Image (spheres, helix red, strand yellow):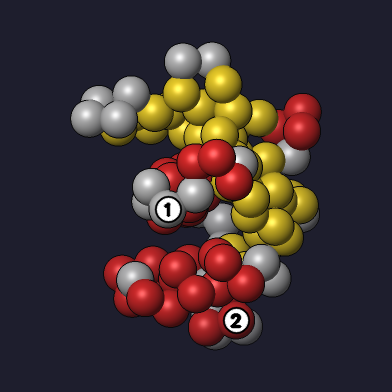
Amino acid sequence: MTSDDRAEGDSVVDAPERSRYEIVRDGTVLGFAAYQKAKDLIVFTHTEIDPEFEGQGLGGRLVRAALDDVRTQGLPVLPTCPFVQRWMAKHPDYADLDYRRRPR
């Protein structure tokens, strides 16, 4: 999975061998959203942006692209990471992905 932001030259890629989505610019990993994948859901556990690149909106772009990819897989998300929780709360168009809101 790759999502390009042409204006910034950033890509978000799934790195399943490291269990995380990474935001990359010119081959350099600027940050990541770590996850644990279960059979029926994906748990986002931690999001981190290199301090040198904070304040540029990279975390939001990273989470949006990761959630867009998860949506294509048809998996719900359990956001235990506070950043992902806050981001999803601010973007109600992603509420349908929240495992806690799905009927069981």
| Residue 72 in sight from this viewpoint | no
Report helix, strand or loop for mark 2. Answer: helix
Q: How many marks?
A: 2
Q: x%, y% of residue 48? A: 64, 50
Identify the image quadrant of the C terminus.
Answer: bottom right
Numbered mark located on residue 55 in the image:
1
Disc 1 crowd, CA 10 A, few/some/many (<14, 14-19, 20+)? few
- At a point 70% along the width and 48% down the height, the residue shown is 34
| Residue 17 in sight from this viewpoint | yes
- At a point 45% along the width and 71% down the height, the residue shown is 88
- At a point 25% along the width and 26% down the height, the residue shown is 6
Outermost top residue:
27
Outermost front residue:
52
Report helix, strand or loop for mark 1. Answer: loop
Q: Which numbered disc, 2 or 1, marks the residue closer to the eye?
A: 1
Residue 58 or residue 77, whichever sits in front: 58
Q: Is residue 76 above or below residue 26?
A: below
Numbered mark located on residue 14 in the image:
none
Residue 11 or residue 94, whichever sits in front: 11
Is 46 on the left-hand or right-hand side of 31? right
Q: Is residue 2 above or below residue 33?
A: above
| Amino acid type, callout 1 | Gly
Name the residue tied to disc 2. 100
Residue 52 or residue 27, whichever sits in front: 52
Is 23 on the left-hand or right-hand side of 95? right
Of marks 2 and 1, which one's residue comes earlier in the chain? Answer: 1
Residue 38, image quadrant: bottom right
| Amino acid type, callout 2 | Arg
